[in-house]
Image: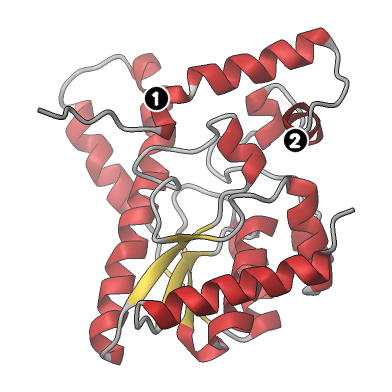
């Protein structure tokens, strides 16, 4: 039986110990308006103090609702929230690609994936900025959960890039349980998961439900078609999990 209180305490200890061992001060993370980033923010506030947590909203042709929900989270826990609009940056990049005369149909996935990569660049920029302002290291916190990671639902060089991961071994339901314990606002905690970029929910894009991914990982009964979909997603994402390095 998952104990949200005990798991929260373990995560908080993990964060505190890592910060102490490495003489770190603060954390920067993207606040998407969804449950994962909200739970990570709440955990960081509890672990290292609200004065050391900086959240960033990074609009990039995304829904205004996400920015509103991010503010709900920041107001709830009291951490600083910076708004950086990356839309013009994205369009400046797209203009350069447009000049190459590539068929736009070939650019759908590239367009979706460049946005989380721009966002992660912004996270690291702000982390470096605060490191100099505060005179001590700020690092970037990741917000991916176990279900997303298992099926490779992340972007290389985007949300796969971070300095500390705290939800990596928690399923979606476990993240929600921790969020309920930390009193994450319901409107955010139980919001339909989406990347805020493609106009689709996570489960629509994946073609499987997060609950079924958790069941698959736990060896529970599932329809064969669902099992094969999840297994295929995991297989196809192998190149994301380990970067091959030649050893002479």
Question: Could you tell me which quadrant the C terminus lies in?
Answer: top left
- Tell me, yes or no, whether the two marked residues, 1 and 2, touch with CB atoms within 8 Å: no
Quadrant in the picture for residue 45: bottom right
Where is residue 93? Give x, y as percent.
Answer: 24, 41
For residue 89, side relative to residue 11 (left or right):
left
- Dot 2: few (<14), some (14–19), or many (≥20) neighbours within 10 Å? many
Q: Residue at horizontal 41%, vertical 31%?
A: 240
Which mark sits nearer the N-terminus, 1 or 2? 2
Residue position marked by numbered label 1 in the rendering: 239
Residue drawn at x 53%, y 73% as measured from the top left: 15
Residue 28 in the figure: left or right of residue 197: left
Q: Specify whether residue 68 is in view.
A: no
Rendered view: 17 above or below 99: below
Q: Nearer the viewer, residue 25 or 159?
A: 25
The Cα–Cα distance between marks 1 and 2, rounded to whole angstroms, is 21 Å
Residue placed most toward the observer, 27 or 84: 27
Residue wearing tag 2: 210
Res 84 quadrant in image = bottom left
Regarding residue 125, the answer to whether it shows in the image is: yes
Residue situated in front as seen by the camera: 196 or 127? 127
Q: Position of residue 104 (x, y in %)?
A: 35, 19
* Callout 1 crowding tier (Cα within 10 Å): few <14, some 14–19, many ≥20: few
| Residue at x-position 79% and y-position 57% | 176
Q: So how many labels did they put on this image?
A: 2
Q: Secondary structure at mark 2?
A: helix
């Amino acid at each position: 039986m998952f104990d949200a209180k005990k798991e929260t305490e373990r995560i908080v200890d993990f964060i505190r110990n890592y910060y102490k061992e490495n003489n770190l001060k603060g954390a920067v993370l993207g606040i998407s308006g969804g449950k994962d980033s909200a739970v990570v923010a709440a955990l960081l506030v509890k672990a290292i103090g609200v004065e050391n947590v900086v959240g960033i909203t990074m609009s990039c042709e995304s829904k205004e609702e996400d920015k509103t929900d991010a503010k709900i989270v920041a107001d709830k826990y009291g951490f600083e929230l910076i708004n950086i609009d990356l839309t013009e940056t994205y369009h400046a990049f797209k203009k350069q690609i447009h000049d190459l005369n590539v068929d736009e149909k070939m650019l759908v996935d590239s367009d979706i994936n460049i946005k989380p990569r721009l966002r992660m660049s912004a996270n690291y920029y702000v982390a470096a900025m605060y490191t100099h302002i505060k005179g001590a290291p700020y690092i970037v916190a990741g917000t991916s959960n176990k279900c997303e990671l298992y099926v490779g639902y992340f972007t290389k060089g985007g949300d796969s890039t971070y300095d500390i991961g705290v939800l990596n071994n928690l399923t979606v339901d476990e993240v929600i349980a921790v969020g309920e314990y930390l009193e994450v606002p319901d409107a955010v905690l139980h919001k339909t998961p989406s990347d805020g970029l493609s106009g689709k929910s996570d489960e629509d894009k994946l073609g499987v439900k997060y609950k079924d991914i958790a069941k698959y990982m736990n060896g529970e009964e599932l329809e064969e078609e669902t099992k094969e979909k999840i297994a295929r997603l995991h297989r196809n994402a192998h190149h994301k999990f380990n970067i091959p390095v030649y050893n002479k």
